[in-house]
Image: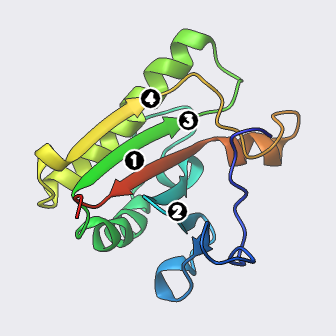
Amino acid sequence: MAGCVPLTSEPSKDHSLIQVVRGPQARQPSLKVIHLPRETWIVLSSDQLFKPHSATLKDTSKQTLNRVLSLVKSYQSIHIQAFTDQTLSQNSRWTLTQLQANQVAAYLWTHHISSHRISASGSIRPNRFASNHSTTGSAMNRHIKIVLKSAPH
């Protein structure tokens, strides 16, 4: 799909465009870290963080979000984007994704990440990793992408 970066457990062949972190931060299958030349992405499964079709964080999401906290602390800019599948109406998708992005932002803020560094947005535009024609594909498309940027040098 155009505009998608495939999530893989292997770094790219040229190692300069995309690298996936290995080690303790990357062992969680629903948390992927992707290093690009000018930014880093953390991609999380919405299903792991939130109750179905909800912006209510699961009790079990704290472990994942604490891992995210350790990864984002050194970055100047933290933009949280939420995406969902196509099973809801357009208005419902926008509302849900905005609320989910806001919940992740609020978690970071309440754990001492400055609100000046954080922005959040929901999206009705697809940011698909897979087809929505299967349960597995739809689950992959329900995700949170955290875009991290350092201060210019």
- Work out whether mark 1 precedes mark 3 in sequence or the reverse, and give the earlier one: 1
- What colour-coding does the image apply? rainbow
Looking at the rendered image, the disc whose residue lies closer to the viewer, 3 or 2, is 2
Q: Nearer the viewer, residue 102 or 125?
A: 125
Question: Most extreme residue toward the right, as rendered?
Answer: 133
Q: Is residue 64 left or right of residue 135?
A: left
Q: Secondary structure at mark 4?
A: strand
The residue at which mark 3 appears reads as 83
The residue at which mark 2 appears reads as 36
Q: Nearer the viewer, residue 39 or 61?
A: 39
Image vertical order of residue 72 relative to residue 118, above or below? below
Image vertical order of residue 120 relative to residue 117, above or below? above
For the C terminus, the image quarter is bottom left
Marks 4 and 2, how far apart at CA: 22 Å
The residue at which mark 4 appears reads as 122
Label 1 Cα crowd, 10 Å radius (few <14 / some 14-19 / many 20+): some
- Work out whether mark 4 precedes mark 2 in sequence or the reverse, and give the earlier one: 2
Marks 4 and 3, how far apart at CA: 7 Å
Label 4 Cα crowd, 10 Å radius (few <14 / some 14-19 / many 20+): many
- Work out whether mark 4 precedes mark 3 in sequence or the reverse, and give the earlier one: 3
Name the spot of residue 120 as percent of width and height, x first: 33, 36
Name the spot of residue 19 as percent of width and height, x first: 59, 74
- Work out whether mark 1 precedes mark 4 in sequence or the reverse, and give the earlier one: 1
Looking at the rendered image, the disc whose residue lies closer to the viewer, 2 or 1, is 2
- Work out whether mark 3 precedes mark 2 in sequence or the reverse, and give the earlier one: 2
The amino acid beneath tag 2 is Leu
The reply to whether callout 1 and callout 4 are in contact (CB within 8 Å) is no
The amino acid beneath tag 1 is Leu
Q: Secondary structure at mark 1?
A: loop
The residue at which mark 1 appears reads as 57
The amino acid beneath tag 3 is Phe
Quadrant location of residue 55? top left
